[in-house]
Image (cartoon, grey):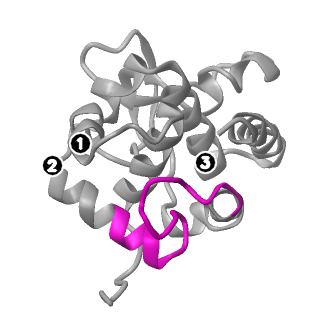
Amino acid sequence: MKKHNGMRPQDIVVLLKIISINNDDWRNIDIANAIGISPSEVSEALNRCKIARLIDSKKRKVNINSFEEFLVYGLKYVFPTEPGSIVKGIPTAHSASPIKEHIASGEEVYVWANARGTHRGQAIEPLYKSLPQIAQEDRLFYELLTIVDTIRVGRVREIKIAIEELKKRLKHA
């Protein structure tokens, strides 16, 4: 059995993408192409997730209860982030759907830095560098990523809303 040397941010991204696909008819190459990483990185991510019991032994189906528990209670400690400088980018966290609909619009906007972005706001480091370029191609995937970013960087009220939205989406996975 392989040694587990800890989770990596792309592991979370791979699992979120599998959830957004919502069926078992995918290949590692499909995940790799969809999120802009190599097939070997997908394979390694799946191996780490199997050891951590976040995916089943066949590495096809995410263990939703375990993954939800990790996202809610562990993510902000394992992959913390803090708002950075003002940049042009893609909205994330409470500045994007589905969280922004529950929050009164304020001046604080969080974005993933991206030259083609439509908003200006404080930069949030994405879990993986390719996310700003590809996240908006899959609505559910983008929503899951913004929920995860809210958990990573949000305040108590925002995190509570993010957890409710996460549970809604994982219930159907």
Which secondary structure class fits the magenta region best? loop
- The segment highlighted magenta reads 46-65
Q: Which of pointers 3 and 2 indicates the residue nearer the eye?
A: 2
Residue 119 occupies quadrant = top left
Q: Which of pointers 3 and 1 indicates the residue nearer the eye?
A: 1
Residue 86 relative to residue 133: left or right: right
Residue 114 relative to residue 93: left or right: left
Of mark 3 and mark 1, the one earlier in the sequence is 1
Of mark 3 and mark 2, the one earlier in the sequence is 2
CA neighbours of label 2 inside 10 A, class few (<14), some (14 to 19), many (20+): few
Looking at the image, is 130 positioned above or below residue 95? below
The residue that label 3 is drawn on is 153
Q: Label 3 vs label 2: CA separation?
A: 28 Å
The residue that label 1 is drawn on is 32
Q: Which mark is residue 137?
A: none
- Residue 49 lies in magenta, yes or no? yes
The residue that label 2 is drawn on is 38
Write the residue at 58% across / 28% down: 143
Quarter of the image with the N terminus in it: bottom left
Write the residue at 45% across / 78% down: 51
Tell me, yes or no, whether the two marked residues, 2 and 1, touch with CB atoms within 8 Å.
yes
Q: Label 2 vs label 1: CA separation?
A: 5 Å
Looking at the image, is 104 positioned above or below residue 54? above
Looking at the image, is 81 positioned above or below residue 148? below
Q: Of residues 82 and 67, which is closer to you in this image?
A: 67
The residue sitting at the top extreme is 118
Of mark 2 and mark 1, the one earlier in the sequence is 1
Q: Secondary structure at mark 1?
A: helix
CA neighbours of label 1 inside 10 A, class few (<14), some (14 to 19), many (20+): some
- Residue 141 lies in magenta, yes or no? no
Residue type of the residue flagged with mark 1: Ala
